[in-house]
Image (cartoon, rainbow, N blue to C red):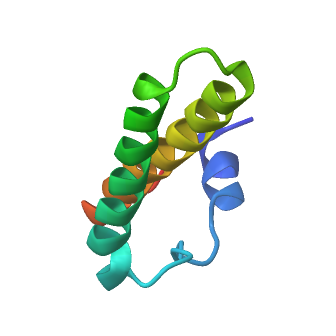
């Protein structure tokens, strides 16, 4: 496969983000705040394994979304 063949495969419509780019900084802060709150709850909770797992999962998902949307706020689309 030649380089010109690869170039023809990549031709298409430009990427359009799911959320309006003006909302990305606010969404980043929102998801980071939610993630940090649940990370704090995870740290304080002792003994109940199901609550700890739930708080850890919520915190991980929210902080992961904050990272991806924060990268999009700076123009890096992952």
Q: Give the quadrant of the N terminus.
A: top right
Q: In screen coordinates, is 11 left or right of 72?
A: right
12 or 5: which is nearer to us? Answer: 12
Q: In the figure, residue 41 lies in which quadrant?
A: top left
Taking the spot 37% from the left edge, 60% from the top edge, the residue there is 72
Would residue 76 be seen by someone viewing this image from the given angle? no
The x and y percentages for residue 59 are 51, 40
42 or 71: which is nearer to us? Answer: 42
Would residue 4 be seen by someone viewing this image from the given angle? yes
Taking the spot 66% from the left edge, 32% from the top edge, the residue there is 51
The x and y percentages for residue 77 are 44, 56
Q: In the figure, residue 25 lies in which quadrant?
A: bottom left
Vertical arrangement, residue 52 with respect to residue 32, above or below: above
Q: In screen coordinates, is 38 left or right of 29?
A: right
Q: In the figure, residue 53 lies in which quadrant?
A: top right
Looking at the rendered structure, the number of numbered marks drawn on it comes to 0
The x and y percentages for residue 20 are 43, 85
Vertical arrangement, residue 21 with respect to residue 55, above or below: below
Q: Residue lying at the far front in this picture: please name it.
A: 47
Q: In screen coordinates, is 41 left or right of 23?
A: right
Taking the spot 30% from the left edge, 84% from the top edge, the residue there is 22
Vertical arrangement, residue 13 with respect to residue 42, above or below: below
30 or 74: which is nearer to us? Answer: 30
The x and y percentages for residue 44 are 41, 26
């Amino acid at each position: 496969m030649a380089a010109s063949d690869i170039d023809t495969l990549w031709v298409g419509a430009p990427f359009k983000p799911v959320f309006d780019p003006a909302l990305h900084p606010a969404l980043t802060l929102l998801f980071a705040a939610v993630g940090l709150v649940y990370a704090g709850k995870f740290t304080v909770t002792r003994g109940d394994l199901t609550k700890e797992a739930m708080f850890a999962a919520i915190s991980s998902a929210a902080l992961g979304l904050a990272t991806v949307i924060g990268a999009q706020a700076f123009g890096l689309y992952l």
